[in-house]
Image (cartoon, rainbow, N blue to C red):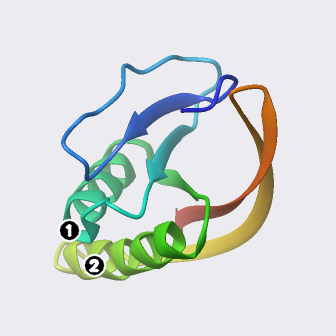
Amino acid sequence: MSNAQPLERAVGEGNAAPARQQRSAEVLKVSTRSRPSAVAGAIAGVMRENGSAEVQSIGAGATNQAIKAVAIARAYLSEEGIDIVCIPSFIDVAIDDEERTAIRLLIERR
């Protein structure tokens, strides 16, 4: 987990980290081992609660899982009449005092 992130939750691995509040957005961290359906459920829950979510991934495998999760979450939410869009960008994160470039997926209602 990175040191200076907003409200954090590791998803899809069965070992969620404790959350810290620094700003209003909730960041869902995805790894290669994350289950897309579990991440999708977390995205859908955050979308229902907050109206937007942020997903971060580092590396090709983690980004693949994150994109699949967004597609699954879109299907979950469409059953409730909620349409979402995903806005990708790069973000620098500090992990163990080392700067890494992550993919940031901002998910919002359309």
Identity of the residue drawn at 28% across and 65% down: 40
Identity of the residue drawn at 57% across and 37% down: 25
Q: Does residue 33 appear in the picture of this structure?
A: yes
For the residue pair 59 and 38, the one nearer the viewer reads as: 59
Q: Does residue 109 appear in the picture of this structure?
A: no
Identity of the residue drawn at 37% across and 80% down: 68
Residue 52, position in %: x, y?
A: 50, 53
> In the rendered image of this protein, does residue 66 appear above or below residue 94?
below
The disc label shown at residue 72, or none: 2
Badges 2 and 1: C-beta atoms under 8 Å apart? yes
Amino acid at circle 1: Ser
Residue 15, position in %: x, y?
A: 24, 35
Amino acid at circle 2: Ile
Q: Mark 1 points at which residue?
A: 37
N-terminal-most mark, 2 or 1: 1
Q: Considering the numbered disc 2 on the image, is that residue within a helix, a strand or a loop?
A: helix
| Relative horizontal placement of residue 26, taking residue 38 as reference (left or right) | right
Marks 2/1: CA–CA distance:
7 Å
Instruction: Name the quadrant containing residue 2.
Output: top right
Label 2 environment density (alpha carbons within 10 Å; few <14, some 14–19, many ≥20):
many
* Mark closer to the observer (2, 1): 1
